[in-house]
Amino acid sequence: MPGPKDLDPSSSPRALLGSELRHAREKAGLSQEELGQRLFVSGSFIGQLEAGTRRMQPEYARLLDEVLGTGGFFLRNCGAANKSKYHEDFAEAAEAEAQATAIREYTPLLIPGLLQTPTYTWAVNRAYDPMAPQETIEQWVEGLMERTRLLDHPTKPLLWVVLDEAALRRETGGREAMAEVLLRIADLMRRSRVIVQVLPFSAGAHAAMQGALKLMEFEDAPPLVYFEGVGTGRLEDAPATVAQLRFKFDLLVASALSRDKSLALIEALAQDYAHEEHL
């Protein structure tokens, strides 16, 4: 029996691929858990593929075609569905972020992407790759600025960020750039668009001293946690891992300054950066 037609590239390839996977799985009479067992992955992973929050890699596409008898459909189309305008290290997480209903994030050393400004983003990316052509840096900055438009919606997604004090004091892009990005954060806070709390140096040891963490929740797919390192990143859906990281985030919130005190500190630092820039 012939498989489904190839995806229309003018549509949303990831969403269509997920829809076709759900259709093929149900036609085969398999639950997400049962299909996951045949691919040696979790049922929640299958759910995320169907919801379009996870990329379908070629090795899984090949197995899906074998198990579901789809005549090579998924392998032929996974490449088109995986094309991304984001830097490869962060592409899958950025695409999942765009579909999240809630994002909780802790960053120890830099302002997280959704809160950044173009000048700050430029400085981060130039430091990330000093040899990259200017056009490449411009593309990365443009991609991230497009991500920040998620916050144009008045309420979705919920964004709750715990910022380490070090991220506020690490001068990135110059003092003017720091004043600009901190004022953007303050504006979003004052408009009740984001929740931001500062984890002060005075908090001492805390639950996430080993690095950043990011948790994402979705309307029709299981939650994900994103781990990021230098030049690498990975998504994980194991319920125990997600629960453990959510607990760590809750501990960070408990150790952080209140929202009012955080706002006061952010605005004070923004004024300091702006004032000293013009001395």
Image (cartoon, helix red, strand yellow):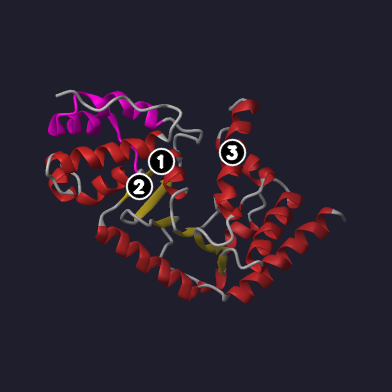
Residue at image position (38%, 32%) is 81
Residue 80: x %, y % from top left: 39, 27
In this view, the residue in front, 95 or 21, is 21
* Kind of residue at badge 3: Asn
The quadrant of the image that shows the C terminus is bottom right
- The segment highlighted magenta reads 53-82
- Of label 3 and label 1, which has the lower sequence position? 1
Against 180, is 256 above or below? below
* Kind of residue at badge 1: Glu
Is 268 on the left or on the right of 16, as rendered?
Answer: right
Let me know if residue 255 appears in the view: yes
- The residue singled out by tag 3 in the image is 125
Q: Are marks 2 and 3 in contact (CB under 8 Å)?
A: no
Is 97 on the left or on the right of 114, as rendered?
Answer: left
- Of label 2 and label 3, which has the lower sequence position? 3
Query: What label does residue 235 carry, if any?
Result: 2
Mark 2: few/some/many CA within 10 Å (<14, 14-19, 20+): some
Tell me the distance, in whole angstroms, between the alpha carbons under discs 2 and 3: 22 Å
Residue 5's quadrant in the figure? top left
Residue 212: x %, y % from top left: 45, 55
Mark 3: few/some/many CA within 10 Å (<14, 14-19, 20+): some
* Disc 3 secondary structure class: helix
Residue at image position (54%, 54%) is 109
Residue at image position (55%, 62%) is 155
Q: Are marks 2 and 1 in contact (CB under 8 Å)?
A: yes
Q: Main secondary structure of the magenta part?
A: helix
- The residue singled out by tag 1 in the image is 92
* Disc 1 secondary structure class: helix
